[in-house]
Image (cartoon, rainbow, N blue to C red):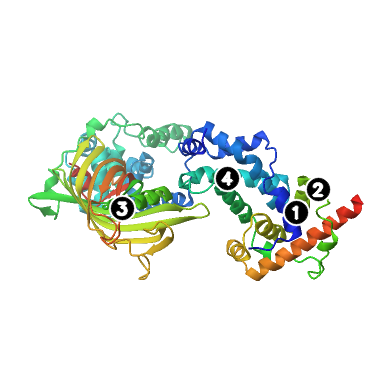
Amino acid sequence: MTEQDLVRGCIQGKRKFQEELFQRYAGKMLAVCMRYARHRMEAEDMLQDAFVKVFEHLGQFQFKGALEGWIRRIVVNTAIKAYDRKSFTHEQIGIDPTWDSASDLPLSDMQLQEEDLLNLINRLPDGYRIVFNLYAIEGYSHQEIAEMLGIQESTSRSQLVKARKQLQTQLFELHKVAV
Amino acid sequence: MKEQHPIDELFRRQLTDYQMETPLHLWSGIESRTRSHVPVSFRSLIWCAALALGLAVFLKGDDASLLMAGFPIQAIPSLPQAAEAPRTPAADDASIRPETQTGSLVAPAADPSGNETTRISAARSKPAQTIAASTGTASGRRAASSFPPALPAPETPSLADPAEASLAAEPFARAPFSELAPLNPLLFQLETEPIQDFIPGIKILGERWYASVELGLSQDWRQKMLSAPAPEFQGYADARKATESIKSAHTASLRLSLISASGWTFRSGLLVSRTTESFVQPDAQRTNTFHEIDIPLLLGRQFSFGKLDLGIHGGAALNMAFYQKGAFLAPDAEKVVEFSSNLPDAYPAFKNRLGVSYYGSISLSHPITPSLHLMAEPYFRYMPQAYTNPDYPLEQRYRTAGVFLGFRKLLGPYWMNLRP
């Protein structure tokens, strides 16, 4: 079944097509949600909310880009809307932002599973986690992140720096244990 | 080009295309949430509350004494007095004879309350006993005490014998209850003068007219039509159709109706409509609102089938104002523009006055009290002119249909005799 047939069937409200679309993209999108959520249950709720929106707005998809990218945008938007703006402005943890030991970490040698990385991301405070995901994995610029989250660009930058620092610390701990 | 931090690179490499197993219950949850349903919006509840308030106001204004006249228990206090009145053959004759001179019951001078409407209304719908007892007049009490006519005249008990006195007094004690027995209304055919002779005033075009006020609320069905006069804007029309949909539409109607004795009707008043539409984009959703204020001018005929009144009305609705606020895709379909009737620099897509629309309706009403009718009125409305300005590349029109549910309050004292 082509992507176009799938989309048309979903727009017509055919359950079989909708289920097919869900099965085709749910695995990847659940992984996206897992990066933004604090835990699995929250991620599953996000995924359901996002797919409900996908089915409601599928008529607006104009086949100009990849369907997966369009769905991913909705999933990401749904995920970030789940958090209050306070998450991005008031979170402070005791990390010295000037400390940088990334160069000391043999990142290329580290054998980490995806689940391990997800665990590390999930431990980040909400604001750090969301900015890190948007910048490092989705590839948005700080300006775009600032617009999406309704925060200052400088806030986005500082949250990213702090997120990296915390991840470095956690990776360093993991490395010490492994060695 | 963004610099690649090693931490970012590690996470991006491993997580961008990462997939997870999805449990089965996730799809069931989505399936149940995407089933079509009719949401009960907060606004619908507001409309219902307004309807209930309207009902309360109407009922409060209704004649309470008229409603109470339907309960014969009101006759009780007057009965012992009537029993004490000396009975004369003349009075007995008058009391057992069905009332033929309604003037004694309904004449204005005989009613201490001075409420002529009540008297006449009751006289036409209630047995004479109930009316007489409730009015409290002497003749009324006599009439009340005399039914049913089979009651024996009480004898004065001897005070010397308490037991005998008690037995003798028993008919007095029972009289009020026995007199509450249902009466045969055929005995009380009221011979009245032709009602037209009572009717004061409103005589137009050789017809006598009475008036009513009608309040109705309708949850509407609206069809939006977007058309592109120039073919190059067909794509734009399609894009707008894809991004906009009607969420809800309501109309409130407050009208004054003039109804002639032969059934002609003229209705006018105020129609206030509110329509909300969704403007959806992948990342956001907005609500556009449109308000219309119209004055309907309707002619029609009204027919009575027993208690049910059927009316057929047609005419025009003159639009007095059209307010709008919201956003939609701009003609290049790339960006979103805001429109508002209140902001002079907003996108000038819509008119502020729409012109004349066609209006037709069929009303059904049924009395719940003599002067208050429950009303249901299916209607349609169509505005032939576009809601949009001539400079705007698309033409936007609406067809509207709905069912007004509400009340009709008949005005004036002679309403019940003038029902055509």
Disc 3, disc 2: CB below 8 Å?
no
Amino acid type at circle 4 is Glu
Count of all numbered marks drawn on residues in the image:
4
Front residue of A108/A93: it is: A108
Q: Give the spatial CA distance, label 2 vs label 4.
A: 26 Å
Residue in the image at 50% along x and 44% along y: A56
- Residue at the disc numbered 3: B232
Q: Residues within 10 Å of mark 3 (few under 14, many from 20)?
A: few
Whether labels 1 and 2 share one chain: no
- Residue at the disc numbered 1: B10
Q: Residues within 10 Å of mark 4 (few under 14, many from 20)?
A: few
Front residue of A33/B136: it is: A33
Q: Give the spatial CA distance, label 1 vs label 3.
A: 49 Å
Whether labels 2 and 4 share one chain: yes
Amino acid type at circle 2 is Leu
Residue B86 visible? The answer is no
Disc 2, disc 4: CB below 8 Å?
no
Q: Give the spatial CA distance, label 3 vs label 4.
A: 31 Å
Q: Is residue B417 left or right of residue A23?
A: left
Q: Chain of mark 1?
A: B
Residue B16 visible? The answer is yes
Q: Position of residue B290 (x, y in %)?
A: 36, 57
Which comes sooner in the sequence, label 1 or label 3? 1
Front residue of A151/B94: it is: A151
